Amino acid sequence: MRVRLAIVGRPNVGKSTLFNRLAGRRLAIVDDQPGVTRDRRFGAGRLGDIDLELIDTAGFEDVTDASLETRMRRQTELAIAEAGVVVFVIDAREGVMALDEVFAAQLRKAGKPVVLAANKAEGRAGEAGVLDGHSLGLGEPIAISAEHGEGLADLYAAIVDAAGGVAADGADDEQGADKPIRMAILGRPNAGKSTLVNRLIGEERLLTGPEAGITRDAVSVDWTWDGRRVRLVDTAGLRRKARVEGGLERLAVQDSIRALTFAEVAVLVMDATCAFETQDLQIADLIEREGRALVFVLAKWDLVDDPGPRLKAFIERAEQMLPQVRGAPVVALSAETGRGLDRLMPAVVKAHFDWSSKVSTRDLNDWLKLAIERHPPPAVEGRRVKPKYMAQIKGRPPTFVLFASRADKLAESYRRYLINSLRQSFDLPGTPIRLTVKAGKNPYAEEMADPVKAFQARRRRARLPSR
């Protein structure tokens, strides 16, 4: 599949940085000074398995005179007309500006598929701006950081949907139930990842052996299980950063992490004779931070004595050391003999289903009322934080926003309590859950800033006649 992608937005929101990120090299000049880009710039890029024809544009200015800015705007309009998909970039740290609203209205008139990208969303400083993007009426804002390469998996999914959900090779439609589950096989070197993939697909597709580090590139394999399409990606082993030797291994590790970025379900393969060591826990934590569904696999299970007690001990250790993915399935198997292999894919499909779950707003707020009654938020400085309303703003992974008074004072321990209760109440074991707490807008803020308006408003509320 090949998509012509125009990157547009007002000045200095990070369009050229995103252009360079997708192109894989520094093609466009990037500077903190706004207005560096003037002409349309073309380049070839790739996102996941999509080939991109990239168009970088000048910052949009709302002018129609004979100035240079007007000619730059005309170049942007031509780029939109030529594009198959338009990526509209806003600055998550500044939020939606007046010029963004003007540009959004023009994009709606253009009738092109639009992906709204909220750039500079790394950390918590951009959370409010991402939520503010809903006001533009262009669909779900995608939180990204072009500078740091964050959020590209969500951007990939949004571009595929905007382009019609066509497969990477253009051969068939991957929308809905026919869309393959993207499944990355991760783990330490010599844990049995390639052997597991070969056993699943029923052929010696990948090179295996007793030596650690045979796999270097992330290798993609298309496969069908029980009528469901699956895209397996085998990856190089991930060792501790201090033990990575040479540029080649560093590139292999980067390729593995990139495969995780574009996966939906991550299968963490561990050698059952030495499972849940420090590096395994760090990989699991990385998977959770990337927001991917997680399935633990204890490979080489045929080498384990007393399998029943050992499996119980492993599950207890996982829940103790990784509370953020509590309930993630643990599958014990032997890829060499095929024992326990039939339990893996049902666990993967269930994890993928949970990861894609949507909860109705009514059910959420009924649950919120009960959760608060069972355990009210702790008082801070003598005043209690009051949760008011909750909604799910996206899935994959499930992401929720809670509106509350004094939102910045809500204790982190109470936020964890809400996440754990969500996971338990809506049957989402092991699923990464994102919860943002936001303060509602103060309807009297404008009045307090202007004494005249405050006086007039008080008179209206008192229904006093005007002089």
Image: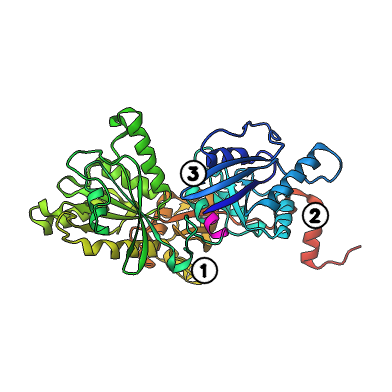
Label at residue 39? none
The reply to whether dot 1 and dot 3 touch (C-beta < 8 Å) is no
Q: In this view, does 90 lie to the left or right of 301?
A: right
- Point out residue 457 in the picture as x, y percentages from the top left corner: 78, 60
- Point out residue 68 in the picture as x, y percentages from the top left corner: 80, 37
Q: Can residue 61 be seen in this view?
A: no
Q: Residue, x 49% and y 68% (percent of image)?
A: 365
- Between 111 and 99, the one lying in front of the other is 111
- Between 78 and 463, the one lying in front of the other is 78
Tell me the mark number nearer the camera, choosing from 1 and 3: 3
- Point out residue 207 in the picture as x, y percentages from the top left corner: 24, 45
Label at residue 453? 2
Mark 2: few, some, or many residues within 10 Å (few <14, many ≥20)? few
Residue beneath disc 1: 361
Label located before the other in sequence (2 or 1): 1
Q: What stretch is highlighted in magenta?
A: 158-163
Residue beneath disc 3: 150
286 versus 106 height, above or below: above
Q: Tell me the element at label 1.
A: helix
User: Is 159 within the magenta?
Assistant: yes
CA distance for labels 3 and 2: 44 Å
